[in-house]
Structure formats: C-alpha cells, structure tokens
Amino acid sequence: MKRSYKSNCIVLMLFSVVMVAFGCDSGNRGTNSNNHKKLQTSVLTKQVKTTEDTKLSSFVLSCGSGCAMTYTPESITGKLPVLIVQFKVEMFVDEELTDTYNEVYEFSYNSSKQIEQVHMQGKNDNVLKTLMPNAQRSFRKFAEELLNR
C-alpha cells in the first residue's frame, strides 16, 4: 500500500515525538521549569473541555521539555469489546500550537470490561506498555471514561 507524503510526515513526526519523550523527559527536569510550568498551566486547562457529541474529556500528554499534545475525541465507533476513537491531536511547543492532525486508536476490552490494549489503528504497539507511565495513565483513564459514556 502506497502512503502519501503527508501520511509519511505524520508517522515520522509521531515517531520523533515519542523518541523525544523517551530521551528528554528524565534528564531535563530543571532546565526549563518556568516555561514548563507555564505550558502545563495553559495546556492543562483544556482537559476540562469536552466535545459536545461524545461528552468525553480531552487529555494532555507531555512530549518533552516545552512540548505537549492535546487529544480531543472527535468520533467513536464500534462496540465492545473493541471501540474505535478518532482524536484531533493538537501539538504545542513552548505554548504555541505547532501542528494539528487526526489519530485513530482502537481500545480493546476483556470480558470483564477492563482495558487490555490500546493501539493506533494500523500499528501493533500497545500504548499501555510502550508509552511513558503518565501517558499510559491518561489512556487508561480515558478508556474507563469511554465505557461510562
């Protein structure tokens, strides 16, 4: 299957963001604390906003020093045990919106309605195992909220 240039750029950007998150998160905690606090304050306020059609909260993932990504659910399809959510993703660097794009994730639940796996559509990596612990918690919390909508 042939990918478009834009699709390749998005995949490359997402891979870069994940690599930066793994590489920068633990070592640079003290260098930009004032900028980071400002970013957290301004970006985290978006967590309380909900989309009208889904009534689910957006959530924010840190992608390194001065970088954050807001995930806002736009549509939900499927039925248990697999729900598919399309997110609008807004990337902020130093409090400036730098990119907006869509990502689709599949949320897989077990028979007890416990989340077992979350992966980007077309990928096999379970973000509940591969992302940083705070990002894993955000996806788990969203998965729980998704069941209660």
Image (cartoon, rainbow, N blue to C red):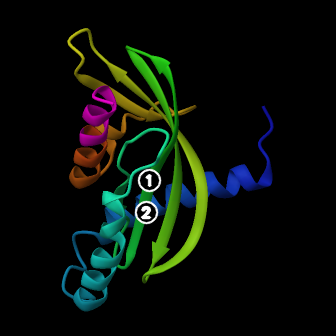
Tell me residue 57's x, y (percent): 35, 49
* Residue 139 visible in rendering: yes
Q: CA distance from mark 2 to mark 1?
A: 6 Å
Residue 51 is inside the magenta segment: no
Label 1: state its secondary structure. strand
Image mark count: 2
Frontmost residue, 52 versus 61: 52
Residue extent of the magenta highlight: 141-149
Frontmost residue, 54 versus 103: 54
Tell me residue 106's x, y (percent): 46, 29
Q: Residue furthest top?
A: 111
- Quarter of the image with the C terminus is top left
Residue behind mark 1: 71
* Residue 129 visible in rendering: no
The 10 Å Cα crowd at callout 1, few under 14, some 14 to 19, many 20 or more, is: many
Tell me the residue at 29%/38% (across/down).
128
- Quarter of the image with the N terminus is top right
Residue 111, which numbered label?
Answer: none
Query: In this picture, is 136 found above or below 25?
Result: above
Residue 147 is inside the magenta segment: yes
Mark 1 and mark 2 in contact (Cβ < 8 Å)? Answer: yes
Amino acid on which disc 1 is placed:
Tyr
Tell me residue 76's x, y (percent): 50, 31
Residue behind mark 2: 69
Amino acid on which disc 2 is placed:
Met
Tell me the residue at 46%/62% (across/down).
17
User: What secondary structure is the stretch in magenta mostly built from?
Assistant: helix
The 10 Å Cα crowd at callout 2, few under 14, some 14 to 19, many 20 or more, is: many
Tell me residue 132's x, y (percent): 27, 53
Side of 115 where 57 appears, left or right: right
